[in-house]
Image (cartoon, helix red, strand yellow):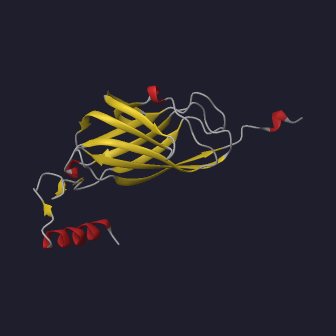
Amino acid sequence: MRLTTLFGITLSLAISIGEVTLPVTQAVQLRDGVVYFVQPPKLVNATTTYKEVNVWGATYYFTIDLPENAGESLQKVTIAQKEGSQNIRYNLDDTRAFVGTRNRKETQLKLSSVTNERDTRTVSINFDPPVTPGQTITIALRPVNNPSFSGVYLLGVTAFPAGERSHGQFLGFGRFQFYSNRGSWWFP
């Protein structure tokens, strides 16, 4: 089912039971105060600087497009490891965010906090002030080192609009493939 169709059905049902206030140029907010994006952000790209296992100094880049018609500013992004044989640890103090892409960095964005929930393997990046619609931003997340085990690691990205009670929109997975760096030079 297409997202626009799903949104239209949901909106129609909510209006018919009196649950939604919908200013044309603002975010969707339910009567209980939960805020939604009108047009959700999009995960444009997820890349890493190094694809070998155990490498120090890597950076994982997540590029997100916040459309003009998002209806609300971007307050928080969470990145949750959903697959991978080893939990990735991060240097949270080295986390950066900026307007632009990995190769075209513009204005640096101020972060209010970056936290890690070990049980859910989720890093939360909070913007202060929130990112205004109509911008492409990139988050640079620094692992302590790449995982020790090769394979596919999936990192789920979720965006939250500004507001005390905001609904997160899942944007997709950053897929990282890490390879063993044991080449033929290790074995004569």
Q: Where 58 sits versus 151, above or below?
A: above
Q: Does residue 186 show up?
A: yes
Tell me: 7 left or right of 22.
Answer: right
Residue farthest right in this picture = 188
The picture quadrant where one finds residue 14 is: bottom left
Tell me: 179 left or right of 12.
Answer: right
Please state the horizontal and vertical placement of residue 159, each as a whole percent of the image: 34, 48
The picture quadrant where one finds residue 17 is: bottom left
Q: Quadrant of the N terminus?
A: bottom left
Q: Quadrant of the C terminus?
A: top right
Q: Residue at x 59, y 42 (%)?
A: 87
The picture quadrant where one finds residue 30 is: bottom left
Q: Nearer the viewer, residue 164 or 50?
A: 164
Please state the horizontal and vertical placement of residue 9, each as a whole percent of the image: 23, 72
Q: Does residue 102 show up?
A: no
Tell me: 43 left or right of 120.
Answer: left
Q: How many marks?
A: 0
Q: Nearer the viewer, residue 120 or 174?
A: 120
Q: Residue at x 22, y 40 (%)?
A: 132
Please state the horizontal and vertical placement of residue 19, each as a whole percent of the image: 15, 65
Please state the horizontal and vertical placement of residue 169, each as a whole percent of the image: 33, 54
Tell me: 188 left or right of 144.
Answer: right
Residue farthest left in this picture = 23
